[in-house]
Amino acid sequence: MKKTITGLLLLFVLLTLAAQEKPDTVYTFRFVTDKDMFYVPFSGNDKELARLEACVERLKERIFAGEIPVRVEGYCTSLGSEVDNLAMAKIRSNRVKSELIIRQGLTEACFVTKNHSGSGDYVTVRISVPKVATAAQKDERQQAGQENADTQQPMEEQRETEESRFVAEQIRADSMVVVHPEAYVPAETTGTAAEETSGTDSYTLSLRANLLRWATLTPDLGLEWRISPSWGILVNGSWTSWSWNDKDRRYALWEVMPELRRYMGKEKRGYLGAMYKAGQFNYKFSATGKQGDLMGGGITGGYQLRLNDALSLDFSVAVGCLHADYEKYTVIDGVRVRRGTETKNWWGPVNAGVTLVWKIY
């Protein structure tokens, strides 16, 4: 009988302990090297996020009451300097917090954030539940002469309570504005995390120089604005004016080429786009010269090869149609003599480039 009663009591204690929340649970979310976006399906992040949501749902009242802070720690080790690593870690921490704010309705005051340079490319979320003494533990302390132990908090619970009182002050000093639902759509709601979230080139301004045009002594410069992870607006301009052989030979032109691009793939390196070109030219490489206007457009495609954090090579080609209206002329005793006009339409390659891209910010 004594063995049976002892066994039942032991089983009751074990079931009571099993039913309690784990006192310290850590959830780890992995990030792609050099990326700041939170890809939910990546490397098991979706399962980890589901576990975290279930835990937050159970403890939401205590989290809002300030009893249980949600501790978020961001890590980055892949960038060149400690300052850059800390900045990247901060962004990653806020990506994870934004998911909890959107999905579970938490507020910024629920979090305690710390960011680190080094150790990897991930974010951890730690939920520490204050330990609650069981009836058996209280009886043991009473038998040991600790009559008031059942009314005193353990040291760890006291530290947790004290830290939770300063959650709001700490979070203001070590966090940045969290993305609102209108500005950031969780990857699971779209089903295309790799396409709708961005790499490091998103929302940046870049300076461009087409090396093929420079090789033909035609200075070429441009700007690109990545208005979103998948879309970019850019414009390139070229200008040159050369004459030789006592001005009997001539090579001059100016062109402006705006373009709209759609970047594709997980890394957002390949793209398709639409371009338009307009300008004027003056060519005289033989006895007869041609001077006039051109315009046209086409479909562009290409790939950006990353060199480092700031530089890339953009390989591109455009196929479409160019329309040119021009005059033919000869030069007699230094005077241009008109020899008629012509109009031509050209179908085929209308532009090509090996462009050096420098990300300004």
Image: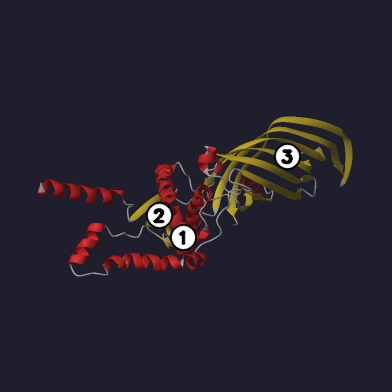
Query: What residue is shown at x 45% (from left), y 55% (from top)?
Result: 61
Amino acid type of disc 3?
Tyr
Amino acid type of disc 1?
Ala
Numbered tag placed on residue 65 in the rendering = 1
* Alpha carbons under labels 2 and 1: distance apart: 22 Å
Q: Pointers 3 and 2 in contact (CB under 8 A)? A: no
**Residue 170: % across, % down:** 47, 67
Find residue 42 and report its image quarter.
top left
Mark 1 neighbour density, 10 Å: few (under 14) some (14–19) many (20 or more) = few
Look at mark 2 in the image and give the residue it sits on: 124
Instruction: Pick whichever, 94 or 122, lies toward us.
Output: 94
Look at mark 3 in the image and give the residue it sits on: 276
Find residue 132 and report its image quarter.
bottom left
Mark 2 neighbour density, 10 Å: few (under 14) some (14–19) many (20 or more) = some
Query: In the figure, 306 relative to 170: above or below?
Result: above
- Secondary structure, mark 1, is loop
